[in-house]
Image: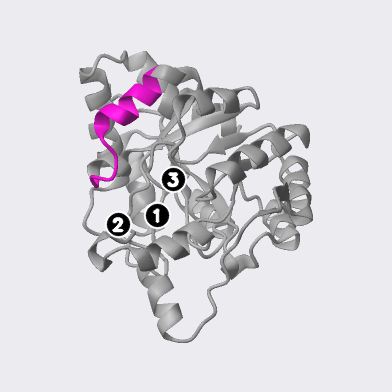
Amino acid sequence: MENSIINGAYDLHVHSAPDVLPRKMDDIEMAQRIIDSGMAGYAIKSHYFGTAERAQLINKMFPGCHALGTMWLNNTVGGINPMAVDIAGRAGTKIIGFPTVDTEYSITRTFQMAPEKRGFWASIIVELKNEGMELKPINILQEGKLLPEVYEVLDLIAKYNMILATGHITREETYALIQAAHERKVERIIATHVSSPGNFTEIDKQKELLQYGAYMEHCTNGVTSGKIEYDVMLAQIKAIGPDRVILSTDLGQPNHKYPDEGLLDFCNRLVESGLSENDVRKTIVDNPVALIQ
C-alpha cells in the first residue's frame, strides 16, 4: 500500500492463530496482510506458549514480513521461570512479557465481572476452574519486595538483549519491576497498555517510568472495544510525547478488525485529532524499530 501512514510499521501486540482461543487470522494470513498493507512486521502474542519458533517459520515463508517471537510468563510456561526464559532467549524470542491472564488481578476480576463483560481470554480461566484445575495466581512482590526469580529473569532478558514487557501486573509491581530492570541493565522496556483499565497509569507516573528507559504502550483495541475513552488515550499520548510511545493493536479477536486495518484506522484518527503524521509514525515505526533492532 503506497503512501500509507502504516508503511514500515510494526505491531508488537498481535493475537494470531494457532492458539487455544479462536482467532480472526493465523500467522500465514497475518504475514500476507503485513506485506499487502506495506507494514514491516508484527509480534506474535500467545498468553500460553512461546512463539519464537512460529516466527522463524513465518520469516522463512514470507521474507517481506518480519515476525517476532514472544513469551508471556503465565502458568503454562511455569510462571516466573528463569529456565523457560533462558530457552526462549536461545530460541530467538524478542519479547518476554510478565504475567497477563494469570495475575491475581486478572483471575479475581474474571469472577467478579458479569460474563458478557469479561475479557476474551477469560473463558479459559472459567473453564479451568470448572474442571477443577488450580488457577495459582501469580504475584511478583512478596512483602513489598520482588521475588528472587524475578531478578534471575531480568538478568536473562539483559543477557539475550530481549525486550521486557510488563503484562497485566499491578501498578505497584510495574514500578518495582521497571526500576529493577533498569538497575539490572535491561535496555528495552515496554510498560504494557498503560491506558487500559487494568493497567491504568496516571500521566505523572508514566513520566516517572520514562527515566528508566521505558516506552509507554497504548493498544487501539482498548478504544475500539469500548474499554477506554479515546480522549483519555489521546491525552496520555500527547502528555508523554511520541518519542516514548508505542502504538499497538492487541487485535486478533474474531469479531474485531484485522490488526493492519485497526492500526490504519486509529493512526488516521490520531492525525485527524491534530497529531502530525511524523509523530504518529514515530509510535508505529521509529520506536518499535529502535526496540527490536
Q: Position of residue 174 (x, y in %)?
A: 59, 42
For the residue marked with disc 3, what is the amino acid?
Answer: His
Q: Earlier in the sequence, mark 3 or mark 2?
A: 3
Q: Which residue is mark 2?
A: 253
The picture quadrant where one finds residue 249 is top left
Q: Quadrant of the C terminus?
A: top right
Q: Nearer the viewer, residue 63 or 26?
A: 26
Q: Who's the residue at 26% across and 27% down the image?
A: 231
* Relative to 21, 255 lies left or right: left
Q: Which residue is mark 3?
A: 13
Q: Are marks 1 and 3 in contact (CB under 8 Å)?
A: yes
For the residue marked with disc 2, what is the amino acid?
Answer: Gln
Q: Which residue is mark 1?
A: 15
Label 3 to label 2: alpha-carbon separation: 12 Å
Q: Are marks 3 and 2 in contact (CB under 8 Å)?
A: no
Does the magenta segment cover residue 110?
no
Give the SS element for disc 3.
strand
- What is the span of residues highlighted in magenta in the rendered image? 225-238
Q: Are marks 2 and 1 in contact (CB under 8 Å)?
A: yes
Q: Please determine whether, in this image, residue 206 is positioned above or below residue 251.
A: above
Q: Who's the residue at 38% across and 16% down the image?
A: 279
